Image (spheres, grey):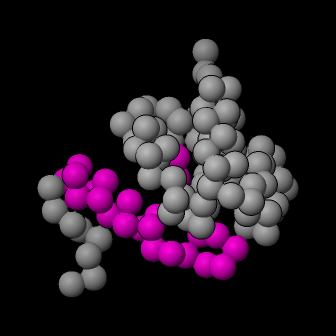
């Protein structure tokens, strides 16, 4: 039997509303504290994937670290309504380097 996980999106209203059209659960938040509660709630409810805007994630290091080494949920950072802060790409680069032993995403 295949288990289907829910997908959630947490972030500022302007950045997350479009995800409703894709059938994802959207939590519009106005502060990192609200975002922490939303991410923790989705994790308890069994979400497999949570997209989180970088705008909120920049002040949620402890929460991100809590889910970093867990299989589920996968917390993926996406640009906020004002564009990318580079945090998501830095996290991807860090994980790839840890997996393969070298930074293959470097532009050098």
Asked whether residue 22 is in view, the answer is no
Magenta stretch, residue numbers: 75-100
Which residue is at a point 84% across and 56% down the rendered structure image? 21
* Name of the residue lying farthest toward the left: 101
In the picture, measured across the screen, residue 80 lies left or right of residue 106, that is right
Percent across and percent down for residue 90 are: 37, 66
Q: Nearer the viewer, residue 35 or 76?
A: 35
In the picture, measured across the screen, residue 3 lies left or right of residue 106, that is right
Percent across and percent down for residue 99 are: 23, 49
The number of numbered discs placed on residues in the rendered structure image is: 0
* Name of the residue lying farthest toward the bottom: 108
In the picture, measured across the screen, residue 8 lies left or right of residue 63, that is right
Percent across and percent down for residue 107 are: 27, 82
Q: Is residue 80 magenta?
A: yes
Which residue is at a point 64% across and 70% down the rendered structure image? 80
In terms of image quadrants, where is residue 57? Answer: bottom right
In terms of image quadrants, where is residue 16? Answer: bottom right
Please identify the quadrant where the C terminus is shown. bottom left
Which residue is at a point 76% across and 49% down the rendered structure image? 27
Asked whether residue 79 is in view, the answer is yes
Percent across and percent down for residue 2 are: 61, 21
Q: Is residue 77 above or below residue 6?
A: below
Q: Is residue 65 magenta?
A: no
Q: Nearer the viewer, residue 3 or 96?
A: 96
Q: Is residue 47 above or below residue 105?
A: above
Please identify the quadrant where the N terminus is shown. top right
């Amino acid at each position: 039997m295949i288990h289907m996980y829910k997908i959630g999106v947490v972030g500022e209203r302007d950045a997350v509303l479009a995800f409703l059209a894709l059938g994802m659960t959207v939590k519009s938040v106005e502060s990192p504290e609200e975002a922490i509660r939303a991410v923790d709630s989705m994790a308890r409810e069994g979400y497999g994937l949570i997209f989180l805007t970088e705008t909120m994630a920049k002040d949620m290091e402890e929460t991100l670290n809590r889910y970093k080494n867990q299989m589920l949920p996968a917390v993926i950072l996406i640009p906020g309504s004002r564009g990318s802060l580079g945090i998501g790409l830095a996290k991807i680069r860090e994980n790839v380097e840890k997996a393969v032993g070298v930074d293959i995403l470097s532009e050098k």
